[in-house]
Amino acid sequence: MKTHHILIVEDEVITRTKLAGYFESEGYRVTAVSTAKEMRLVISQEDISMLLLDITLPDESGLLLAREVRAKSNMGIVLVTGKTDDIDRIVGLEIGADDYVTKPFNPRELLARVTNLLRRIHNHSEAPVQHKSIYHFDGLLLDASRRHLLDRDQQEIKLTRAEFELLLVFMTHPGQVLNRDRLLSQVTHRSWDPNDRTIDVLIMRLRRKLERNYKQPMLLTTVHGEGYLFSGLDE
Protein backbone atom coordinates (compact mmCIF):
# COMPACT_ATOMS: atom_id res chain seq x y z
CA MET A 1 0.00 0.00 0.00
CA LYS A 2 1.35 3.44 -0.94
CA THR A 3 2.46 5.60 1.98
CA HIS A 4 0.23 8.63 2.38
CA HIS A 5 1.98 11.95 1.82
CA ILE A 6 1.04 14.70 4.29
CA LEU A 7 1.77 18.35 3.56
CA ILE A 8 2.06 20.59 6.62
CA VAL A 9 1.75 24.35 6.04
CA GLU A 10 2.64 26.07 9.31
CA ASP A 11 4.67 29.26 9.86
CA GLU A 12 5.56 28.54 13.50
CA VAL A 13 8.81 26.60 13.25
CA ILE A 14 8.42 24.70 16.53
CA THR A 15 4.89 23.56 15.75
CA ARG A 16 5.87 22.69 12.17
CA THR A 17 8.89 20.66 13.28
CA LYS A 18 6.96 18.81 15.99
CA LEU A 19 4.09 17.93 13.67
CA ALA A 20 6.44 16.74 10.93
CA GLY A 21 8.41 14.58 13.34
CA TYR A 22 5.29 13.14 14.92
CA PHE A 23 3.67 12.06 11.65
CA GLU A 24 6.98 10.76 10.26
CA SER A 25 7.38 8.60 13.38
CA GLU A 26 3.97 7.11 12.59
CA GLY A 27 5.10 6.03 9.13
CA TYR A 28 3.75 8.87 7.00
CA ARG A 29 5.70 10.68 4.32
CA VAL A 30 5.78 14.34 5.35
CA THR A 31 6.65 17.63 3.69
CA ALA A 32 6.56 20.73 5.88
CA VAL A 33 6.58 24.32 4.59
CA SER A 34 5.86 27.77 6.02
CA THR A 35 4.31 29.80 3.19
CA ALA A 36 1.57 29.67 0.57
CA LYS A 37 4.14 29.93 -2.21
CA GLU A 38 5.96 26.83 -0.95
CA MET A 39 2.64 25.00 -0.54
CA ARG A 40 1.67 25.59 -4.17
CA LEU A 41 5.07 24.40 -5.37
CA VAL A 42 4.83 21.14 -3.43
CA ILE A 43 1.26 20.48 -4.57
CA SER A 44 2.27 21.06 -8.20
CA GLN A 45 5.06 18.49 -7.92
CA GLU A 46 3.81 15.88 -5.46
CA ASP A 47 0.81 13.60 -4.94
CA ILE A 48 -0.54 14.90 -1.61
CA SER A 49 -3.05 12.85 0.39
CA MET A 50 -3.61 15.23 3.30
CA LEU A 51 -3.09 18.96 3.85
CA LEU A 52 -2.65 20.31 7.38
CA LEU A 53 -3.07 24.03 6.84
CA ASP A 54 -2.61 26.85 9.34
CA ILE A 55 -5.21 29.58 8.84
CA THR A 56 -2.91 32.46 9.81
CA LEU A 57 0.05 32.38 7.43
CA PRO A 58 2.40 35.36 6.89
CA ASP A 59 1.70 35.76 3.18
CA GLU A 60 -1.88 34.61 2.51
CA SER A 61 -5.08 33.56 4.28
CA GLY A 62 -5.27 29.85 5.02
CA LEU A 63 -9.02 29.95 4.40
CA LEU A 64 -8.53 31.30 0.89
CA LEU A 65 -5.81 28.73 0.27
CA ALA A 66 -8.14 25.95 1.40
CA ARG A 67 -10.78 27.17 -1.03
CA GLU A 68 -8.18 27.23 -3.82
CA VAL A 69 -7.00 23.70 -3.08
CA ARG A 70 -10.52 22.29 -2.76
CA ALA A 71 -11.50 23.71 -6.15
CA LYS A 72 -8.75 21.64 -7.76
CA SER A 73 -8.35 18.57 -5.56
CA ASN A 74 -10.15 16.05 -3.33
CA MET A 75 -7.21 15.67 -0.96
CA GLY A 76 -8.07 15.76 2.74
CA ILE A 77 -7.87 19.22 4.28
CA VAL A 78 -7.53 19.86 8.02
CA LEU A 79 -7.36 23.49 9.11
CA VAL A 80 -5.13 24.29 12.08
CA THR A 81 -5.38 27.58 13.97
CA GLY A 82 -4.90 29.31 17.27
CA LYS A 83 -8.27 31.03 16.94
CA THR A 84 -11.35 29.79 18.76
CA ASP A 85 -13.89 31.83 16.80
CA ASP A 86 -16.69 29.60 15.49
CA ILE A 87 -16.97 31.83 12.40
CA ASP A 88 -13.59 30.62 11.10
CA ARG A 89 -14.55 27.03 11.77
CA ILE A 90 -17.87 27.32 9.94
CA VAL A 91 -16.28 29.18 7.02
CA GLY A 92 -13.66 26.45 6.83
CA LEU A 93 -16.35 23.80 6.45
CA GLU A 94 -18.24 25.94 3.95
CA ILE A 95 -15.25 26.13 1.62
CA GLY A 96 -14.70 22.38 1.74
CA ALA A 97 -12.28 21.62 4.58
CA ASP A 98 -12.74 18.19 6.16
CA ASP A 99 -11.82 19.07 9.72
CA TYR A 100 -10.73 21.88 11.98
CA VAL A 101 -8.44 21.77 15.04
CA THR A 102 -7.55 24.57 17.44
CA LYS A 103 -4.18 25.10 19.08
CA PRO A 104 -3.11 23.83 21.48
CA PHE A 105 -4.17 20.35 20.35
CA ASN A 106 -3.27 16.84 21.41
CA PRO A 107 -0.99 15.29 18.75
CA ARG A 108 -2.55 11.87 19.29
CA GLU A 109 -6.03 13.27 18.70
CA LEU A 110 -4.85 14.99 15.52
CA LEU A 111 -3.20 11.76 14.37
CA ALA A 112 -6.43 9.83 15.00
CA ARG A 113 -8.47 12.36 13.01
CA VAL A 114 -6.02 12.35 10.10
CA THR A 115 -5.78 8.55 10.08
CA ASN A 116 -9.55 8.11 10.16
CA LEU A 117 -10.07 10.71 7.45
CA LEU A 118 -7.47 9.10 5.18
CA ARG A 119 -9.04 5.69 5.74
CA ARG A 120 -12.52 6.95 4.86
CA ILE A 121 -11.26 8.78 1.77
CA HIS A 122 -9.36 5.68 0.62
CA ASN A 123 -12.24 3.30 1.32
CA HIS A 124 -14.69 5.54 -0.51
CA SER A 125 -12.46 5.87 -3.55
CA GLU A 126 -11.82 2.12 -3.68
CA ALA A 127 -15.40 1.00 -3.10
CA PRO A 128 -17.31 -0.10 -6.20
CA VAL A 129 -20.49 1.76 -7.05
CA GLN A 130 -23.37 -0.32 -5.68
CA HIS A 131 -26.18 1.83 -7.04
CA LYS A 132 -27.38 3.01 -10.38
CA SER A 133 -25.18 5.57 -12.06
CA ILE A 134 -27.51 8.19 -13.56
CA TYR A 135 -30.04 10.24 -11.59
CA HIS A 136 -32.43 12.82 -13.04
CA PHE A 137 -34.15 15.35 -10.78
CA ASP A 138 -35.83 18.69 -11.40
CA GLY A 139 -33.97 19.23 -14.67
CA LEU A 140 -30.57 18.28 -13.27
CA LEU A 141 -28.51 15.16 -13.99
CA LEU A 142 -26.08 13.39 -11.67
CA ASP A 143 -23.67 10.81 -13.10
CA ALA A 144 -22.59 9.11 -9.88
CA SER A 145 -19.89 6.97 -11.48
CA ARG A 146 -18.10 10.08 -12.73
CA ARG A 147 -19.08 12.45 -9.88
CA HIS A 148 -20.48 14.70 -12.59
CA LEU A 149 -23.48 17.00 -12.04
CA LEU A 150 -25.11 19.01 -14.84
CA ASP A 151 -27.43 21.96 -14.27
CA ARG A 152 -30.61 22.81 -16.18
CA ASP A 153 -28.54 24.37 -18.97
CA GLN A 154 -26.25 21.32 -19.24
CA GLN A 155 -23.40 23.15 -17.54
CA GLU A 156 -21.29 21.33 -14.97
CA ILE A 157 -21.89 22.13 -11.30
CA LYS A 158 -18.70 21.68 -9.30
CA LEU A 159 -19.15 19.56 -6.16
CA THR A 160 -16.72 18.99 -3.33
CA ARG A 161 -16.22 15.41 -2.20
CA ALA A 162 -18.45 15.92 0.84
CA GLU A 163 -21.18 17.59 -1.22
CA PHE A 164 -21.17 14.70 -3.69
CA GLU A 165 -21.28 12.09 -0.93
CA LEU A 166 -24.19 13.81 0.79
CA LEU A 167 -26.12 14.27 -2.45
CA LEU A 168 -25.64 10.60 -3.29
CA VAL A 169 -27.09 9.60 0.09
CA PHE A 170 -30.22 11.60 -0.75
CA MET A 171 -30.34 10.13 -4.27
CA THR A 172 -30.38 6.60 -2.86
CA HIS A 173 -32.94 7.43 -0.13
CA PRO A 174 -35.57 9.62 -1.84
CA GLY A 175 -38.61 10.47 0.22
CA GLN A 176 -36.96 9.38 3.48
CA VAL A 177 -36.27 11.67 6.43
CA LEU A 178 -32.57 11.34 7.28
CA ASN A 179 -31.24 12.70 10.56
CA ARG A 180 -27.87 14.43 10.99
CA ASP A 181 -26.17 11.43 12.64
CA ARG A 182 -27.00 9.18 9.70
CA LEU A 183 -25.99 11.76 7.13
CA LEU A 184 -22.70 12.59 8.85
CA SER A 185 -21.77 8.90 8.99
CA GLN A 186 -21.92 8.80 5.18
CA VAL A 187 -19.75 11.86 4.60
CA THR A 188 -15.95 11.91 4.61
CA HIS A 189 -15.74 14.48 7.36
CA ARG A 190 -14.74 14.53 10.98
CA SER A 191 -16.38 12.45 13.69
CA TRP A 192 -19.64 13.61 15.23
CA ASP A 193 -19.51 16.53 17.60
CA PRO A 194 -22.74 17.48 19.45
CA ASN A 195 -22.20 21.09 18.32
CA ASP A 196 -21.07 20.20 14.80
CA ARG A 197 -22.79 22.11 11.98
CA THR A 198 -21.14 20.14 9.18
CA ILE A 199 -24.38 18.73 7.76
CA ASP A 200 -26.24 22.03 8.04
CA VAL A 201 -23.41 23.79 6.18
CA LEU A 202 -23.33 21.12 3.46
CA ILE A 203 -27.11 21.26 3.05
CA MET A 204 -26.92 25.04 2.64
CA ARG A 205 -24.19 24.66 -0.01
CA LEU A 206 -26.17 22.02 -1.91
CA ARG A 207 -29.32 24.15 -1.85
CA ARG A 208 -27.42 27.06 -3.40
CA LYS A 209 -26.22 24.76 -6.19
CA LEU A 210 -29.39 22.71 -6.79
CA GLU A 211 -32.48 24.68 -5.90
CA ARG A 212 -34.25 27.06 -8.27
CA ASN A 213 -34.65 29.34 -5.26
CA TYR A 214 -32.39 28.27 -2.40
CA LYS A 215 -34.25 30.53 0.02
CA GLN A 216 -37.40 28.47 -0.59
CA PRO A 217 -35.99 24.95 -1.07
CA MET A 218 -38.19 22.38 -2.74
CA LEU A 219 -35.67 19.54 -3.25
CA LEU A 220 -33.88 19.46 0.11
CA THR A 221 -36.41 20.32 2.77
CA THR A 222 -36.04 20.54 6.53
CA VAL A 223 -38.21 18.31 8.71
CA HIS A 224 -38.01 20.18 11.99
CA GLY A 225 -36.78 18.10 14.89
CA GLU A 226 -36.02 15.11 12.65
CA GLY A 227 -33.65 15.91 9.80
CA TYR A 228 -33.74 16.48 6.06
CA LEU A 229 -35.85 15.08 3.23
CA PHE A 230 -35.04 14.86 -0.48
CA SER A 231 -37.86 14.91 -3.00
CA GLY A 232 -37.97 15.44 -6.73
CA LEU A 233 -36.17 12.39 -8.12
CA ASP A 234 -37.56 11.61 -11.57
CA GLU A 235 -38.74 8.10 -12.34
Image (tube, grey):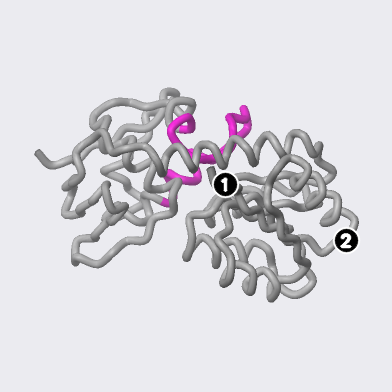
**Looking at the picture, how far across and down is residue 134, in whole percent?**
18, 46
The disc placed on residue 211 is none
Image position of 115 with respect to 42: above or below: above
Structural crowding at the residue carrying mark 2, measured as other residues with C-alpha within 10 Å and reported as few (<14), some (14–19) or many (≥20)? few
Which residue is drawn at the image coordinates 81% and 37% (left, top)?
106
Which residue is drawn at the image coordinates 56% and 42% (left, top)?
118
CB within 8 Å, label 1 to label 2? no
**Looking at the picture, how far across and down is residue 103, in whole percent?**
82, 46
Query: Callout 1, which amino acid?
Result: Asp
Residue at mark 2: 13
Please tell me which residue lies in front, 137 or 39.
39
Query: Callout 2, which amino acid?
Result: Val
Image position of 216 with respect to 120: above or below: below
Residue 109: quarter of image: top right
Please tell me which residue lies in front, 47 or 85.
47
The disc placed on residue 98 is 1
Q: Please provide the residue range marked out in magenta.
A: 184-205
Which residue is drawn at the image coordinates 62% and 66% (left, top)?
65
Extreme residue toward the right, this view: 14
Structural crowding at the residue carrying mark 1, measured as other residues with C-alpha within 10 Å and reported as few (<14), some (14–19) or many (≥20)? many
**Looking at the picture, how far across and down is residue 184, in whole percent?**
48, 32
Q: Is residue 20 left or right of residue 128?
A: right
Q: CA distance from mark 1 to mark 2?
A: 24 Å
Which quadrant does the C terminus fall into?
top left
Residue 202 counted in the magenta span: yes
Which residue is drawn at the image coordinates 37% and 27% (left, top)?
178
SS at mark 2?
A: helix
- Residue 88 seen from this side: no
SS at mark 1?
A: loop
Image position of 62 with respect to 170: above or below: below
Q: Is residue 159 left or right of residue 102?
A: left
